[in-house]
Image (tube, rainbow, N blue to C red):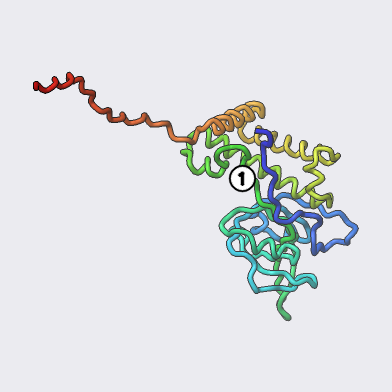
Amino acid sequence: MSAFLRPTRAVTLLAALLLTARPAHAQQEVKTTPAKEVAANPQRYWARGVVFRDELISPPGKETLSIAGTRVHKFTTKTIGDCYADERVLAALQELAPSREYIFAASVFSQQTGFLRKKTHYRVVVNGIIIPADNVSDLPNTIETAIAQIEEDNPLRQNLVTLKNLIVNVQEALTAMAATEQISRAEYLNPKSESFDKLIQTSRRAINDLETETKVPGREQLAQILASLVALEEGALKPAPQPAPPQPTSAATNTPDAAPAEK
């Protein structure tokens, strides 16, 4: 298994946050935030960058809106509801399959409507999209397939779910870090780059968070995940071989040669 994880297929690389309400020279801090928190309290994230995971319900259509002088396109997610796509990610969003979870990078804007009684609306404008990793290379089945096939109380399935969540958590944090530092994601993924160490640090934090949550040491978690991957590689999902049915054999006859006919 030379390449343990396939490179994430990023629909768009998050180079810089668009439509920022701050001056162009200011560095905008971007934080990973649960989608339900953004939906419940959007005012807390006004003029800030957020990275969240949410399920795409419907891709952008023809409905548009002008925000901060820029035309954006409406689409819908499961938790936040109405979101808006910047032009630079519009084509990528339209290609995404609905009913699947993605990582979105966005900025929150406010708009006022009405004349006498003004009402403030908060708009979540997406400017970056990442498809979370969900498979492992050189394995006979993807993690998603394995999780779907194995019963919920099976430790093998539980370990694969843990692995998937670790990968997605690191991707989510990496997306926020790339947006904050305005550095290409490729820099963090290059082992020869100085930024690669930040990816390692982010991975350590994800493991530390897992330790705190589960009270299980990181080494033990790694051992369990590795054992599950080896089991998967060795055919844990393959059905047990069935004994071959007996093959019919022809009955042998040992009859004496017929006596020669008398003359």
**How packed is label 1: few (under 14 Cα within 10 Å), some, or many (20 or more)?**
some
* Residue toward you, 248 or 212: 248
Q: Residue at x 70, y 34 (%)?
A: 208
| Image vertical order of residue 70 relative to residue 161, above or below | below
Residue 37 spot, x, y in % from top left:
66, 54
Check the picture and name the quadrant holding the C terminus: top left
Check the picture and name the quadrant holding the N terminus: top right
Q: Secondary structure at mark 1?
A: loop
Q: Amino acid at mark 1?
A: Asp
Q: Give the residue at the far left of this rendering.
A: 263
The answer to whether any part of residue 21 appears in the image is yes
Residue 238 spot, x, y in % from top left:
47, 35
* Residue toward you, 100 or 114: 100
The answer to whether any part of residue 52 appears in the image is no
Count of numbered circles in the view? 1
Q: Residue at x 65, y 48 (%)?
A: 132
| Image vertical order of residue 116 relative to residue 122, above or below | below
Q: Which residue is mark 1?
A: 134
Say which quarter of the image contains residue 79: bottom right
* Residue toward you, 243 or 137: 243
Q: Give the residue at the far right of this rendering.
A: 25
Q: Residue at x 58, y 30 (%)?
A: 230
Residue 43 spot, x, y in % from top left:
72, 61
Q: Is residue 211 left or right of residue 127?
A: left
Residue 72 spot, x, y in % from top left:
72, 69
Q: Is residue 40 left or right of residue 197?
A: left
Say which quarter of the image contains residue 35: bottom right
Q: Give the residue at the far front of this rendering.
A: 263
| Image vertical order of residue 209 relative to residue 80, above or below | above
